[in-house]
Image: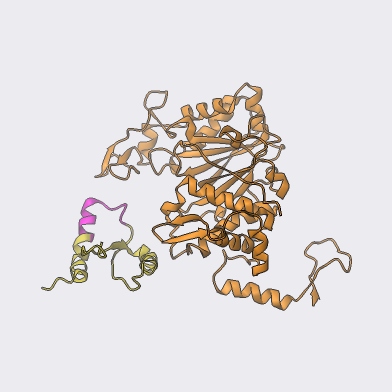
Amino acid sequence: MTAHVDAATTSTEAGELPLVDSGEVLRAIEYYAERGWTDGLPVVPVTESYLAEFLAQTDRDPDEVLLTMPHLNRSCTVRLAAINAALAGCRPEYFPVVVAAWESLRKEGYVPTGIWQSTTGTAPLLIVNGPIREAIGLNSRGNVFGSGFRANATIGRALRLAAINVFGLRPHQLDQATQGTPAKYTACVAENEEDSPWPALHTDYGLAATDSAVTAMVIRSVVHIEARHTTVPEQLALDIAGTIGRTGALIHQTISACVALCPEHAHLFDRAGWSKADLRQFLFDHAVNDHATLAAVGKDALSRRSKWRVPADHPDAVDDDSPAGPEEGTVRSLNSAEAVQVIVAGARNAGVSAVIELLGSRGEPPAVTPVPPAPAR
Amino acid sequence: MERAGLPAVSICTDAFEVTAQAMAGVYGFPGFEFVTVPHPVASLSAEQIRDRVRDVMPEVVRILGVES
């Protein structure tokens, strides 16, 4: 037995560092890596007794199927989800959130069709609401989308490891992403309900503020909006709308998005009398492109069958019948106000928000999924 | 389609060769023969597409087992 070395620059009192057989731990980590059971980072070795602690956090049968990819004839069961949550470094009490995340992905509907294998290179994003955030230490404030919080880091990673280990979606093989996204390591945020002037996301879709919920979305880019300069709501909203409408994001006729407002920006809108619905309507009306802008990048028509954007002189081109914007000669990037969601996340220290570009949903309600309390034992 | 009794040949670009082999393995057909064409296809003109088809046609006919 040897003591771990101190990983911090501050000195630790002798006797505080845990004693471990480092050779055994390293052998286990290397074994998992050699089997390819990893996203590239070391994983936590999982024993049957440790797995049992995860399974004790849910009433579900370990063999219950959470999500199937029919074209691969492979399914993720509760037991497989638990193994991969443990590998990812989750604590057992995070497992109800992981189970709800898989349910939400199934409801969202894009993952079972094979989007995780696409050249598009998407990742799942999880948004967590309600009391479970505090209970397990999920970050909703400073450095949201970033590192530093075990629950955020490992719950998102639990999905990625299952994508690799359960569905076999390894890059260069069944995962054909041309370029991935850092979100493929992990992408799990909590909504900053405490610093939001508006009702939380899950309460917009029928749950109580005292309920906990996970909402999964299929994302690619998280594009930041730098806007510390204005107190005018229209200016800020136009900055956001310009990012939602950017031509580079347009694969299909329209896009969908989730705007993650920092508390400062959310309060700016609220002080001006804007509700979340007002902001969504404004973004619907102003995330537009004129025909000249689309023609300049060769995205001014649609492919007859795929409806992907193509140049007007493409052999498969048909006219762009996208919904017209409020101004003459413009087309909308969103098909409805419902195609943009709004959450509040981040610190109360600057005017920095983000547009999360979504694939899949085009205005359907988000896959808000309740997290049941752990069973009493 | 072949399992349904309909002779078929899969064609993909060379960029997808590894994935195509992996999918064939998933479906229980390791070593399944398919035709590859140079990548990319999406940005080709109609004439260039015709050239690609002309180039691979002998290979398609061979995999279908057509005897000359």
Is A312 positioned to the left or the right of A123 in the image?
left
Q: Is residue A231 visible?
A: no
Kindly identify the residue that appears in the image at 81 percent across and 61 percent down: A9
Q: Is residue A373 above or below residue A322?
A: below
Q: Position of residue A247 (x, y in %)?
A: 43, 40
Chain rendered orange: A
Q: Which span of residues is magenta-colored?
A: B41-52
Quick check: A275 left or right of A76? right
Question: In the rendering, at what x and y percent does residue B47 appear?
Answer: 21, 53
Q: In the visual, does B58 lie left or right of A67?
A: left
Name of the residue lying farthest toward the left: B68
Residue A288 percent location from the top left of the image: 44, 31
Q: Is residue A73 above or below residue A345?
A: below
Say which residue appears at 43% left-offset and 35% top-offset: A333
**In this view of the protein, which residue sits in the foreground, A152 or A318?**
A152
Quick one: which chain is yellow? B
Most distant residue in the front direction: A377
A156 part of magenta stretch: no
Image quarter of the N terminus of chain B: bottom left
- Residue furthest to the top: A273
Q: Residue at x 55, y 73 (%)?
A: A35
